Image: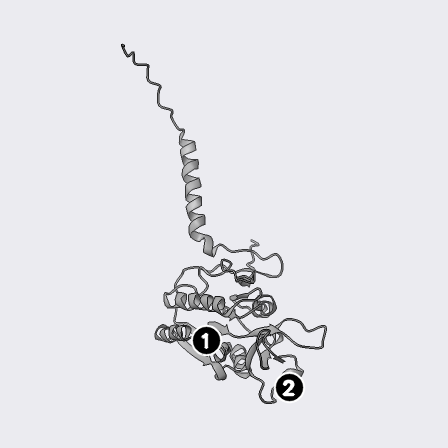
Amino acid sequence: MVHIPQRARPARRISSTRVKLLLLGFAVLLLALGLAPIIPYYLPKGDYEQANATANPPLKQLRIIYFDSLYVDFPNRELLNLVKLLKIVHNVSVYLGENATVAQLMEIIRSGNFDVLIIRAHSAPMETGSPFEKGIAIFGERADEEKYFIEQLAGLVRRARPLWGVGVYYALTPLAFEGLNFSNKIVILLSCGGFDDYMPGVIAGGGGIYASWTGFVSVEENDKVAKSILTNLLNGRHPLYGVIGVVDSQYGSKFLAAAPRRNTAQ
């Protein structure tokens, strides 16, 4: 049988406009995948927005305070070793266990002598008879003796107990964070439900970034985020890089960060 070749069809040409659109779409996809951990998520209300953590290294030696009152009940040597390594690079002060008291935390936030404040602590809803006082409180030391009389009358300190624990602690309320100067500072609360209650005071005080959980979190999940934050600082990255908005707890809460809303008016 004789094979008669058919006339070849001319190759279909793709317009230069279509090529450009395809390349542009591919570039946008790569950009979205690469920047997913740091794209800001805008909060629906308030004079603040989700912080946009970048990978830019610090421009100077940072003053870092690591306040860990949770260490008494849940010690974590791995986190402490990372903090010790941080001392090689930055100016780091550590308040651990029984030395992480409510009085010490009040002194820290009032002095403002830090660039990054990392608080690892218990927190729980305040036990109070007042219907006008709501929110959680950050735990300090155990309430084994009577003190903080004036601070309790002023609503700055409360007695509280963990939801799933025993013992009574002295705890710092959100009111203690109001009216202070947090200008360009990073405040990170590694504790249950600290985002909504403490964030307004820090942001109103000029805080650069405030970060915490929106609800309940386990110690293991909390410490996983703490490890990422400390590792970021060791590697010269923003402490919240790759963490905010992408971490969920088994209880459905998220680890979020907020910053003062930028003025976009020309």
Instruction: Give percent across and percent down for residue 156.
Output: 62, 79
- Where is residue 95? Give x, y as percent: 46, 80
Q: Nearer the viewer, residue 240 or 110?
A: 240
- The numbered mark, 2 or 1, whose residue comes first in the sequence reads 1
Q: Mark 1 is on which residue type?
A: Tyr
User: What residue would you read off at disc 1?
Assistant: 66
> Is there any visible trace of residue 178 in the rendered image?
no
Quadrant in the picture for residue 137: bottom right
Q: Position of residue 107 (x, y in %)?
A: 53, 81
Whether residue 132 is visible = yes
Q: Residue at x 45, y 77 (%)?
A: 75
Image label count: 2
Dot 2: few (<14), some (14–19), or many (≥20) neighbours within 10 Å?
few
Residue closest to the far top: 2
User: Along the line of sight, which residue is nearer the eye, 2 or 264?
Assistant: 2
Say what secondary structure mark 1 lies in. Answer: strand
As measured in the structure, the alpha-carbon distance from the residue carrying label 2 to the one carrying label 1 is 27 Å
Q: Where is residue 244 in the image (x, y as percent from the top left)?
A: 49, 60
* In this view, 143 is above or below 75: below
